[in-house]
Image (spheres, grey):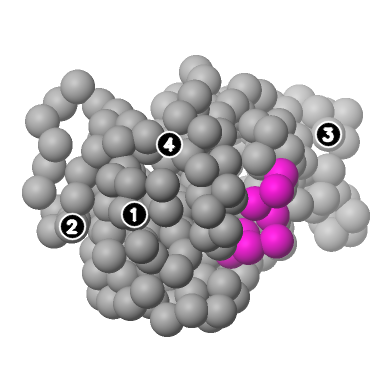
Amino acid sequence: MFQAVGFDLGETLIEYEGVALDWQGEYPRALAAVASSWGDSLAPAQIEAGMAVLRRYNTRLAPRRHEVDCALLFAELLVALDVRTQDVSALLDPAIDAFFSVFQRRARPYLDAASSLATLASADVPVGVLTDVPYAMPRRLVVADLSAAGLVELEPLLLTSVEVGRRKPDPAGFVALAECIGCSPAAMLFVGNEEKDILGAKAAGMTAALVWRSEAPIPAWGQDLSVTELEQLPPTVVGR
């Protein structure tokens, strides 16, 4: 049995109903929400300028291992939107909240998440979460997703790419998660749904499990085991 288990968050424990993994289709609506946060609307040219900034930070289009600063990202976005104010900083928090609210509208846990987490809790196996956040999303909004999905108990051992400063598959976040839990990476299982989860966990010295919820064939990314739902994790893995 492993001393601890780490999980990815989005599409592993939580799904965002109606939201594609690549957010480009929602850019215009998200930018409109940003402008509404200070009581304005955007012209087509402003929307195009804002979308250009968002595409530069879209890790589906331009993968990166380093993480960016949320305030700097959104300050750049507001400048691109041609905000008519001397104090852009005063608009940042409302703009950030408005932007992410478009994508957080339906966060819910997978049905197998609660039961698997309960099994681990009953076996006294510590559980941590390492998640890459989109567009440097602040931790408070990730915690809001956990709360909306009924998984707020995971907050104490939650690490985001912003806090780590690195994104998967960089092993730094996986090592940091093991340190937070208080065990070595070699004593941990990490469960995720993407290749970067598997590569990062293996690079850190963890055992890696792929949860593959798609009907497509299960890919070979070097994972130690593959499941189609979390309840299929072997009893020796989750402490049953």
Looking at the image, residue 112 sits to the left or right of residue 209; the answer is right
- The kind of secondary structure element at disc 4 is loop
Residue type for callout 2: Asp
Q: Disc 1 or 4, which lies upstream in sequence?
A: 4
Give whichever of discs 4 and 2 has the lower sequence position. 4
Amino acid type at circle 1 is Val
Residue corresponding to mark 1: 237
The answer to whether mark 2 and mark 3 are in CB contact below 8 A is no
User: Which residue is most to the top?
Assistant: 18
**In this orientation, does residue 210 appear?**
yes
Judge the density around disc 4: few (<14), some (14-19), many (≥20) Cα neighbours within 10 Å. Answer: some
Query: Magenta segment range?
Result: 152-159
Residue at image position (48%, 39%) is: 116
Query: Which of the labelled discs sits on residue 224, or is there none?
Result: 2
Q: Nearer the viewer, residue 97 or 181?
A: 181
Q: Amino acid at mark 4?
A: Glu
Pointers 1 and 4 in contact (CB under 8 A)? Answer: no
**First in sequence: mark 1 vs mark 3:** 3
Instruction: Answer above or below: position of 139 versus 194.
Output: below
